[in-house]
Amino acid sequence: MQSSNSNYVKALVSTSRNEYNASEEVLDALVEDLEAVKAEYAENPPAVYAADEKWPETLDEALAIAESSREQLRENDIEAAHEALEPMRDLFLELHQRNGIDTMGDRLTEFHTIMEIAVDAANENDTVAVVTLIPELELRWEAVASAEPPETADENYEASLEAVELKIHELETAAILNDEEETKKVAEEMRRAFALVFVKYGVVIA
């Protein structure tokens, strides 16, 4: 599972950066990892998922997502390959929620959902919508910051979280001032700051 998560995060990053060769390599690895997980654990789940009736179905869906993304990449549509990977976040968030698991990675997923709505609003010059989303962005990010740090947390962990928090505050200021260009700029900076946290510390498949 750990290897699957690592390759999933790498695949998200490489496809978002239009890196075809890296994406091909890591998507192949992700499919292989998930095939191995399915073969070993589909009928013998980890103890925490032993009572989850949807566990085999979840593994099937995860593998299908990875295969779909790889197929899109093979058709030279790297943007579609990236989009095809996104449902993996919600798939494992739902698995964790069903089984009483609450990780920093799950909270990152919940923040990501609201963040993308805010970024879209900023790009549409809807500063009013951005302002209304700030409280939820703050709430979701506080949930991330207050979660138990992942095993990969290092001396840069707190500073990385604070960088996102700073961008949320800057986004609020720009949107309140109805500065459309600054709001777009800061929204993208917030997304990048989030991506740095996710790449280094994010856990989806667990």
Image: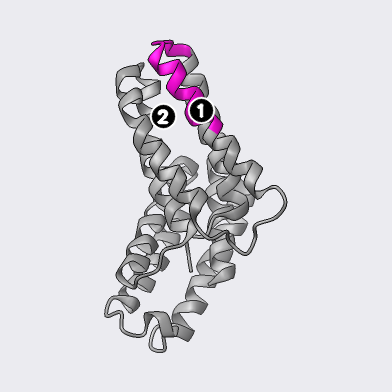
Amino acid type for the residue under numbered disc 2: Val
Left or right of residue 55: residue 182: right
Specify which label sits upstream in the sequence, 2 or 1: 2
Q: Residue 23 in the image: x percent, y percent?
A: 58, 51
Judging from the image, what secondary structure is the residue with disc 1 in?
helix
Please name the residue shown 49% across and 52% down the image.
146
Q: Is residue 179 magenta?
A: yes
The 10 Å Cα crowd at callout 2, few under 14, some 14 to 19, many 20 or more, is many
Left or right of residue 188: residue 43: left
Amino acid type for the residue under numbered disc 1: Glu
Alpha-carbon span between mark 2 and mark 1: 7 Å
Please name the residue shown 63% across and 46% down the image.
158
The 10 Å Cα crowd at callout 1, few under 14, some 14 to 19, many 20 or more, is some
The magenta-colored residue range is 166-181
Judging from the image, what secondary structure is the residue with disc 2 in?
helix
Q: Is residue 28 visible?
A: no
Left or right of residue 151: residue 108: left
Q: Are marks 2 and 1 in contact (CB under 8 Å)?
A: yes
When the figure is inspected, residue 42 is found, relative to residue 123, above or below; the finding is: below
**Residue 188: mark:** 1
**Residue linked to disc 2:** 119
Give residue 45's quadrant in the image: bottom left
